[in-house]
Image: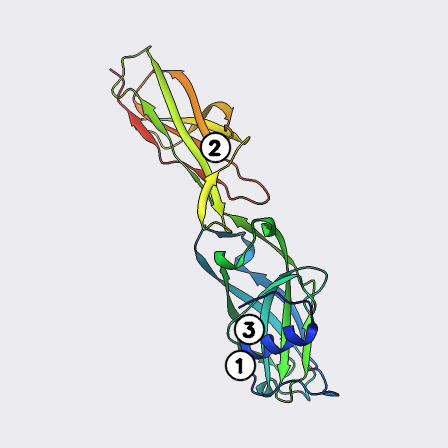
Amino acid sequence: MRIRATAAAVLGALALSALAVPTAQAAGTTAPNVTFSKMKVNAGKAITVGATSTVKVKVTYTVTHPSTVSLSGIATGPLIYRGTSAKSPDNEFISDDPGTCTKVDSTTANCSATIAVTAADLYNSEAGTWKEGGLAVNSSGGMKWQSDLGTIPVRRAAKLTADATPEPVKKGKTLTVTGKLTRADWQKGTYVGFAGQSVKLQFRKAGTSTYTTLKTITSSSTGALKTTVTAGSDGYYRYSFAGTSTTSSVSAAGDYVDVQ
């Protein structure tokens, strides 16, 4: 569930709904006496979101509590957010359902949950580092927000193509390799050219498994790529992009060229 709210009361109400807690928080209620730790979102790997996709990521975390406190009346869930705190974020995704927890001992439980990150609910400017946090809600509506449990990159998905011509080609003749680098535009719901990026042209000789870099070129204002090489032997040509802090890495499928 994604939340955009500036008022803690609105955020709390939405969070209660997301965690399926039946009662609203009342004035004077006591926050659950629990602490989140060891949170790992998507196994620590960047979350890459396509132009129109919804990406569901697994989250694991540990909850500790006094031995006198029972978790049976407390719903817990992970979240990722942008802003200064989980309680008052600029933007936030919370697990749609409470975490499933397994008791370790009288004061510790290991939990897991799923967060769905939806492209339609993202601005392009939000690509980059998000913070991790947790929310616990008890049966009386008391809430505990915990911030700064880690960070996770959320990146715009990239696409890359490569086409080598002519095919076939005589040895020693010139090959032209064209392609295009694009990335997800979450606000438009499509892929757009990614300009001014360094992209490697790579070659894999037929019968081998490793690509080697031939040269590095820069994508045009529309994301277009074009360069030439001298044909030497049968093999596959592709472009490869290393990615940025806001955009995923990607390699094009190799285009086979028969050299005669």
Residue furthest top as drawn: 172
> Marks 3 and 2: which is nearer the front?
2
**Is 230 on the left or on the right of 3, as rendered?**
left
Residue type beneath disc 3: Cys
Q: How crowded is mark 3: few (under 14 residues within 10 Å), some or many (20 or more)?
A: many
**Is 232 on the left or on the right of 123, as rendered?**
left
Earlier along the polypeptide chain: callout 3 or callout 1? Answer: 1
Quick check: 16 above or below 218?
A: below
Residue tagged 3: 111
Along the line of sight, the residue nearer the viewer: 47 or 53: 53
Q: Which residue occupies 43% across, 54% down?
A: 52
Residue tagged 1: 20
Residue furthest right as drawn: 28
Quick check: 246 above or below 219?
A: below
Earlier along the polypeptide chain: callout 2 or callout 1? Answer: 1
Residue type beneath disc 2: Gly
Residue tagged 2: 223
Residue 53 is labelled as: none
Earlier along the polypeptide chain: callout 3 or callout 2? Answer: 3
Quadrant of residue 226 in the image?
Answer: top left
> Marks 3 and 1: which is nearer the front?
1
Q: Which quarter of the figure is the C terminus placed in?
A: top left
Q: Which residue occupies 51% across, 44% down?
A: 248
Find the distance from the CA under tag 3 to the CA under tag 1. Answer: 17 Å
